[in-house]
Image (cartoon, rainbow, N blue to C red):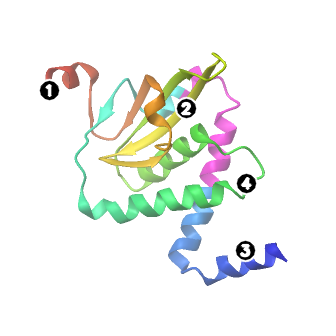
Amino acid sequence: MKIFRKVRAFLRLNMKMKLLLIEAFVYLAWARYLKSVPFSKVAPLLGERMGETTFSSHSFNKEILRNVSAAIHMISGYTFWESECLVKAIAGMKMLEKRKIESTLYLGTAKDKHGEFVAHAWLRSGSYYVSGSETMEKFTVVASFAKGCSIKKSEKENHG
């Protein structure tokens, strides 16, 4: 009976959110497929390597960012495949790219309590973290990929 409640909840959503959830589902599937491809082939699709987009936010994008983030997090719990941090970050980046909103995808590493290396990915647009912000502070950034107008690493160092 739990499934009927969830279907009923989906049907009660407005059409805009339904379409966003369907889009998120499709992009999560695509991003999960990309995870099975060698990263050297995927990296060029993610944007400018070691680039970073601006931290300034545009107020007109806030609602879009919140809705994309909510859709990714909501629907990732219903996929038939693993939809964790990297999959969510890639899907979010593609959804924002479609809307011509710049974003930066970060890849980080850290050691867990057993001394084993662990990885994490998160996505930022302006000052808003679309995905992965829950644990990002525990990780050291090892790569970033900027989509949209970006500040190159050398320019970032010159600006502070």
The residues tagged by marks 3 and 4 sit, at their Cα atoms, a distance apart of 14 Å
The residues tagged by marks 2 and 3 sit, at their Cα atoms, a distance apart of 30 Å
State which tag comes first along the sequence, 3 or 4: 3
The amino acid type found where label 2 is placed reads His
Q: Which residue is mark 2?
A: 120
Query: Which element type, helix, strand or loop, lies under badge 1?
Result: loop
Query: Which element type, helix, strand or loop, lies under badge 2?
Result: strand
Q: Which residue is mark 3?
A: 6
- Residue 118: x, y in percent? 61, 24
- Residue 88: x, y in percent? 57, 45
The amino acid type found where label 1 is placed reads His
Total marks drawn?
4
Are the two marked residues, 1 and 3, in contact with CB atoms closer than 8 angstroms? no
Q: Is residue 28 above or below residue 14?
A: above
Kindly identify which numbered label has been placed on residue 79: 4
Q: Label 4: how many residues lie within 10 Å, few (<14), some (14-19) or many (20+)?
A: few
Query: Which element type, helix, strand or loop, lies under badge 3?
Result: helix
Q: Which residue is mark 1?
A: 159
Kindly identify which numbered label has been placed on residue 104: none
The range drawn in magenta is 26-42
The residues tagged by marks 4 and 2 sit, at their Cα atoms, a distance apart of 20 Å
